[in-house]
Image (spheres, rainbow, N blue to C red):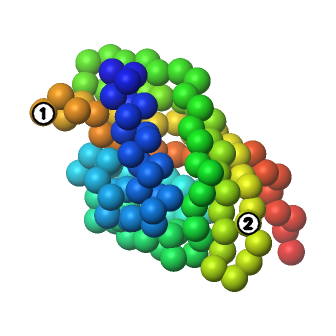
Amino acid sequence: MRQAIESANAGLISALEKSDSVGAASFYDPDAMVMPQGMPAATGRGAIQNTFGGMIAAVKFSGMKLDIQNVVADGALAAETGRYAWTLTPAKGTPTTDSGKYVVVWRKQADGSWKLYRDIFNTDAPALPSK
């Protein structure tokens, strides 16, 4: 199961680095939810595709790495915790490297594959000061 998760993570990274929101969303369960920092949650593959599309329109993803720290499975669900690092480059701006942590719940599909079911991640960077 961990090997399947690592393979799916690699596919998701590849899609995001290719600016492919449709490909990225394909790694998610039809009833999945993504909860990015500073953005509303996106529920369902279509909403996830739109969320990734908006992110991709704003920045180019590169140098993405996921460091799985733990995977625990029970039946049709598995929980993954880990750390991420990536470089985000705005269309007209300088690249910014970011790192943080994530929790993902995977759901086993009828065909035996694993799809992302719940996905939340947030940066380790300090919060911006209030105005």
Query: Which residue does the image show at 22% across and 32% down from the upper left?
Result: 113
Dot label at residue 110: 1
* Residue 112 visible to the viewer: yes
Q: x%, y% of residue 122?
A: 64, 48
Query: Which residue does the image show at 49% across and 53% down from the upper left?
Result: 35
Q: Nearer the viewer, mark 2 or mark 1?
A: 2
Query: Can you identify the residue that label 2 sits on?
Result: 95
What amino acid type should be assigned to the residue bearing mark 1? Ala
Dot label at residue 45: none
**In this picture, residue 30 sits left or right of residue 89:** left
Residue density around tag 2, few if under 14, some if 14–19, many if 20 or more, within 10 Å: some
Which residue is more in the foreground, 98 or 107? 98
Up-down relation of residue 104 to residue 42 (above or below) = above
Q: x%, y% of residue 92?
A: 69, 82
Most distant residue in the left direction: 110
Which residue is more in the foreground, 13 or 73? 13
Mark 2 / mark 1, whichever is N-terminal: 2
What amino acid type should be assigned to the residue bearing mark 2? Pro
**In this picture, residue 81 sits left or right of residue 118:** right
Report the quarter where the N terminus lies: top left
**In this picture, residue 118 sits left or right of residue 44:** right
Among the 4 quarters of the image, the one containing residue 110:
top left
